[in-house]
Each structure stands twice: as structure tokens, then as C-alpha cells.
Image (cartoon, helix red, strand yellow):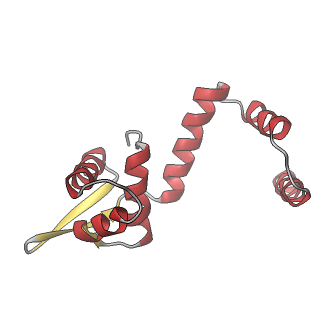
Amino acid sequence: MKNISDSEWKVMKVVWDKNPILASEIVEALSSDTDWNPKTIHTLIRRLVAKGALKAEKKKTYYNYSPIVSEKDCVQAETKTFLQKCFNGSLNLMMANFIKDDKLSEEEIDELEKLLHSKKSR
């Protein structure tokens, strides 16, 4: 599947939350969060169908849209792209960057330690 743009991600989130879903429902959901007109949203939907991210199923005079790809799979693909683009694919460099530059709370540090411990004990 081709990369999904930031705008297309917004459409996908609506579809992942409720599917199958009508285009009019997608337009309604995004109109309150964005300043996009309905034509823009319909264009984004068509692009996602062309990219193989959404399935369009004709029902009488309208289409139902469903995700072909899961949110988890898309997040994993985007994470790999981000890692490759920014850190030459190195998870260690990314983690070191975030840990050095961000102020982590005790709770966040504890959670990271738990995740690492869990991964190590597997």
C-alpha cells in the first residue's frame, strides 16, 4: 500500500472508528474537525480507494466504505517509514533522541522500563 498523507489519515481514523460507513457520514464527521469542503473529503476517499486502503461497496445509489488495512498495520508501516527517514532505521537512535530531548515523567519512565523488561523476558 502507498503512503497515506496526513489528510488521508484523518479520513482513515473516521472509517476505522465506524465501518462500514457512508461518504456522507465521513463528510459529517470531518466537517466539524476541519475546514474542508465535501468535495475535498470525497477526493480523499477516492484516493484511499485507489491506494488500496479503503473498499467501496455499492449499495443501490450510495457506497459503503470499509478499511482494507488495519490501523495497527498502518501505524507499523508509518513507524518504519519514520524510523528510516529520520534515524536511518535505528530504533536505538530514535529512543536516545526522545529520551535525551524530552522531559519524561516518572510514570513514563516506569512504563518504558516495564515495556523493556517485558520484551527482554520474552
Please name whichever residue, 121 or 85, is drawn nearer the observer in this view of the structure: 85
Task: Determine which quarter of the picture holds residue 110.
Answer: bottom right
Q: Please state the horizontal and vertical placement of residue 73, each as a whole percent of the image.
A: 51, 53
Q: Is residue 29 above or below residue 110?
A: below
> Position of 70 compared to 11: left or right?
right
> Position of 76 compared to 36: left or right?
right
Seen at 73% across and 34% down, the residue is: 94
Please name whichever residue, 6 or 79, is drawn nearer the observer in this view of the structure: 6
Seen at 22% across and 55% down, the residue is: 42
Please state the total of marks drawn on the protein image.
0
Q: Please state the horizontal and vertical placement of residue 59, each as a whole percent of the image.
A: 13, 73
Please name whichever residue, 30 or 63, is drawn nearer the observer in this view of the structure: 30
Seen at 44% across and 70% down, the residue is: 17
Q: Please state the horizontal and vertical placement of residue 10, each as a whole percent of the image.
A: 42, 55
Task: Determine which quarter of the picture holds residue 93.
Answer: top right
Q: Residue furthest left?
A: 61
> Position of 32 compared to 42: left or right?
right
Q: Quadrant of the N terminus?
A: top left
Q: Quadrant of the C terminus?
A: bottom right
Q: Residue furthest top?
A: 88
Q: Is residue 60 above or below residue 5?
A: below
Seen at 26% across and 46% down, the residue is: 47
> Position of 4 compared to 117: left or right?
left
